[in-house]
Image (cartoon, rainbow, N blue to C red):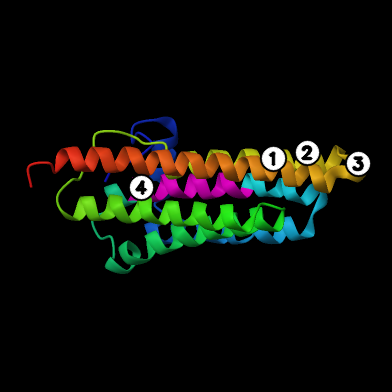
Amino acid sequence: MRTRVAPDSLVGRAILSTRFPPGAVVGVGLSASLLIPVCVLLGGPIILVSLPLIAVTALADASYALLAARSTSLSRRVLVFEPLAARLSEGAWLLALWFLGAPGWSVTLTGALCWMYVLTRNRARQVGLRELGMITMGERSVREIVVALGFGAAGVIAVAGGGQYEQWIGGAITIAVTAWMLLAALGLLQLVIVVSTALRND
């Protein structure tokens, strides 16, 4: 399993020293993401609370990858439910973006593209392509950055936007969702090209 944090780095050593079960960090990341729509519904400056929640989810993702790679007793239950937790997290982000004014069709299409990306990558691994040789624009870390920028912009506008903040928030969120959708589409295209090339002799 590839990890985004080097085990011998300062962050990697700190994560490994905690000895948290991989399943526990998956639960922490999912819980943080599920709180984001609540923050958005409360509105105003509380939207900015989404940023540390996304940071917690990103840290949980990195921790899970590192802890799972070093674990000698990773349960099958965790392996089954970790992808589900990741999709639920992204669903919570998309729901929050929709609450803030993102068009429903773009939210739906973005979710579908992410689902197709993950499904394609998982199926490729099942047929033996463990390392696809590249990091695409559809990676979860890219999604986290785009979503964080969108919520950050919405929070700042909510605090300082005055009476027109709702319209401005809708515009900023639409840009964020559109960027996520385009990156997901390009990432899926990259992945399809790499997998097709690797399997061209089959």
Location of mark 4 (residue): 65
| Left or right of residue 38: residue 120 | left
**Label 2 CA crowd tier, 10 Å (few <14, some 14–19, many 20+):** some
Residue 100 or residue 24, whichever sits in front: 100
Is 91 magenta? The answer is no
**Magenta residues, dominant SS class:** helix
Residue 95: where, in percent of width, then height?
62, 59
Location of mark 2 (residue): 156
Distance from label 3 to label 2 (Cα)? 11 Å
Distance from label 1 to label 3 (Cα)? 17 Å
Q: Amino acid at mark 3?
A: Gly
Range shown magenta: 53-67
Q: Amino acid at mark 2?
A: Val
Location of mark 1 (residue): 152
**Label 3 CA crowd tier, 10 Å (few <14, some 14–19, many 20+):** few
| Left or right of residue 68: residue 156 | right
Q: Earlier in the sequence, mark 1 or mark 4?
A: 4
Assess whether mark 4 and mark 3 are in contact (beta carbons under 8 angstroms): no
Q: Quadrant of residue 185?
A: top left
Q: Which mark is residue 162?
A: 3
Q: Amino acid at mark 4?
A: Ala
Q: Secondary structure at mark 4?
A: helix
| Total labels drawn | 4
Q: Earlier in the sequence, mark 3 or mark 4?
A: 4
Assess whether mark 2 and mark 1 are in contact (beta carbons under 8 angstroms): yes
Q: Earlier in the sequence, mark 4 or mark 2?
A: 4
**Label 1 CA crowd tier, 10 Å (few <14, some 14–19, many 20+):** some
Q: Secondary structure at mark 1?
A: helix
